Image (cartoon, grey):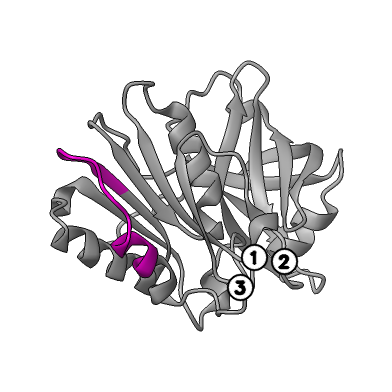
Amino acid sequence: MSAPLVRRSPAHPATVRGSVELTPRMRRVTLHSDALVGLLLRPAQDVELLLREPSGRRVKRRYTISGHRPDTGEIDVDVFLHGDSPGSVWGATAAPGDALEFQGPRGKLSVTSAPWHLLCGDESALPAIVAICAGLPADEPAIAVIEVTDAADELPVNATVHWVHRGDTPPGTPAVLTGALSALSLPDGPGHGYLMGETRTMVAARALLEERGMQHDDIFVKGYWNIGRPDRIAGRVPGS
């Protein structure tokens, strides 16, 4: 019996159109590709960029699409700058005309109607949180609990935002976000939760929200990175 055919996502060529600094540690890079012309996206979908290390080795980094313009075939990706990893170096140095390839867009997150929405995460989730909140109906309020190093990392979010500054506490310490969630007053009625960030922290946050009455199936969880696994951080959080 022959082995099953493995189908892989095609790689699309893209060109950097420009970049802009959002915060001292976050840069927005605009990409253009003919493959994106006319393509309608769901909030918080991502693309996987095919990058090269100085040695020539190919590496992949996934980034949430923070903005897209189907008429021009452009998307924006927000890159958290930290360290000298391939993702951070690319985000800091990307210049108009630079060529690269990507796979996607992809993503399983589906935003469904609810009386209210709770979004929780760290820097890795900030682009997704911004995108989700921007796409919510005006009559469905959003509450966001976002962990960052300090006020310099804050970005505008269309929600009632509770910024959690961890300061010198190491990223991925569950108590930072779970402590803020424990103290948070939640609206009445059933809400939907979206938890995205360091895996252990998101698992702990889900358990906490279930203890507070949120239904398991109403909570979306996505681990973007893991403590001790900087190679899995996907270019979006400290150590990327």
- Label 1 and label 3: CA atoms lie apart by 31 Å
Q: Are marks 1 and 2 in contact (CB under 8 Å)?
A: yes
Q: What residue is pinned by disc 2?
A: 86
What number is the disc on residue 59?
A: 1
Task: Look at 68% across and 19% down and name the residue there.
Answer: 72
Quadrant location of the N terminus?
bottom left
Instruction: Out of 96 and 161, give the one closest to the viewer.
Output: 161
Residue 34, image x, y percentages: 66, 26
Q: Quadrant of residue 58?
A: bottom right
Type of amino acid at the residue the image marks with label 2: Pro
| Residue 46 in view, yes or no | no
- The boundaries of the magenta stretch are 178-193
Point 73% across, 43% down: residue: 29
Q: Amino acid at mark 1?
A: Val
At x 15%, y 63%, the residue is 211
**Above or below for 161 versus 201:** above
Mark 3: amino acid: Gly
- Residue beneath disc 3: 167
Mark 1 burial class by Cα count in 10 Å: few <14, some 14-19, many 20+:
some
Q: Is residue 190 magenta?
A: yes
Q: Is residue 3 magenta?
A: no
